[in-house]
Image (cartoon, rainbow, N blue to C red):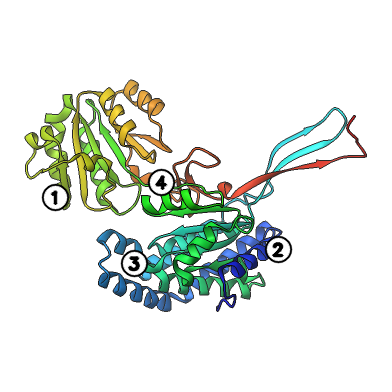
Amino acid sequence: MTITATTPQERMHAARTASRSLGLLTDAAKADLLRSIAAAIEANIAPIVAANAEDLARGRADGLSTGLLDRLTLDDQRVRALAAAVRDVAELPDPVGRVLDERVLPNGLHLQKVSVPFGVIGSIYEARPNVTVDIAALALRSGNAVVLRGGSAAQSSNAALISVMRGALAEAGVDPEAIQTVDDFGRDGARALMRARGLVDVLVPRGSAQLIETVVTESSVPVIETGAGVVHIVLDESAPLEWATDIAVNAKVQRPSVCNAVETLLVHRGAAERLVPPVVAALQAQGVTVHGDDATAALAADVVPATEADWATEHMSLDISVRVVDDLDEALAHIRRYSTQHTESIITADDAAAERFLAEVDAAVVMVNASTRFTDGGEFGFGAEVGISTQKLHARGPMGLPELTTTKWLARGAGQIRS
């Protein structure tokens, strides 16, 4: 469905207007709306995949990395998965109207603190057309309009998806201006979105550390910061070999281009001879290049010497950094220095070490004996996710529907005045 507004500001004004009626929809109406969007996406798989093929061809010509091309790709299965994710969001409890606090003052004034939509949510992100659908679905389910800037690499895919979703809104009798894009304005659109204080209530960036830093520093709109994932797994002295191998391989190999993939393994020196050779070999068998310190290289073959930069690198590829540490103290010190506070995990059979790790590591998600790949809104039962927040205000960790609401106090009186 064609967007007629000719400037970013006009589109954001239209989203603001649409948000007023959208915020009044009932739970059932919002759920039905998302089911309609899911059906429309499935009915338009062919044109969506064709539009994505244009982006992929342009991305290969422009030299996009393998990781970015993977995030950009939409095939039949991935488009169906997008529709399924929208249906999952439709079935989630309505986050709007929850009574979070309630009290009656001595003078009889009745107070309620309730959850309400933000109004208009903006998002700036890179070559991730799935985010276009995920954020739109979560925004609509929580009664918010949405303004999207998805980046030039996915412009054809995003345009096709947004057109399909806006068409579904119109057919359902909902103002299609509730879904907007500023993609066609390029960087000017992104700048306008970052400066739209008063039109856009909150901005959520998703992508590289550079993109997120740019949005955080330049935006006048309040930002929920989602961070890069320099993710660690500690192999403790008591780590079972099977767990260590299976979890390390899963966390690195299953999908190396995502932010919850492991980037650094820290191996307790007391277990290094037992764990490093088989774990490194298992990773290498899956095509992973291991960047290791001297102790790692002494225990395993074909290890690339690690540099200082490797410890701070989010590889987003089949590369991993491996370091042998003296003890849990040194592992924790390494994490404090290099962690982006996304996800950290320890593999251990020692309950005391596990509890210490859970207590001392400062990250959005801290795990024991589990793959870091579980840090995900869908895996956590939130349906699709807006992003994984690495900040500490309002939202932290995988963000679902409740994080897309704010609050207001309702006061019901019977003529009370303040003395």
Three-letter amino acid code at disc 4? Gly
Measured Cα–Cα span from mark 2 to mark 4? 33 Å
- Classify residue 265 as left or right of residue 125: left
Disc number placed over residue 285 in the picture, else none: 1
Three-letter amino acid code at disc 2? Ser
Disc number placed over residue 73 in the picture, else none: 3
Question: Looking at the rendering, in which quadrant would you find the N terminus?
Answer: bottom right
User: Crowding near pointer 2: few (<14 within 10 Å), some, many (20+)?
Assistant: some
User: Crowding near pointer 4: few (<14 within 10 Å), some, many (20+)?
Assistant: many
2 and 34: which one is in front? 2
Res. 26 image quadrant: bottom right
Q: Position of residue 152 (x, y in %)?
A: 39, 68
**Picture layout, residue 416 above or below residue 250:** above
Q: Are marks 1 and 3 in contact (CB under 8 Å)?
A: no
- Classify residue 157 as left or right of residue 108: left
Chain-order first, disc 4 or disc 3: 3
From the viewer's perspective, is the residue at label 4 or at label 3 nearer? 4
Disc number placed over residue 21 in the picture, else none: 2
Chain-order first, disc 1 or disc 2: 2
16 and 165: which one is in front? 16
Chain-order first, disc 1 or disc 3: 3
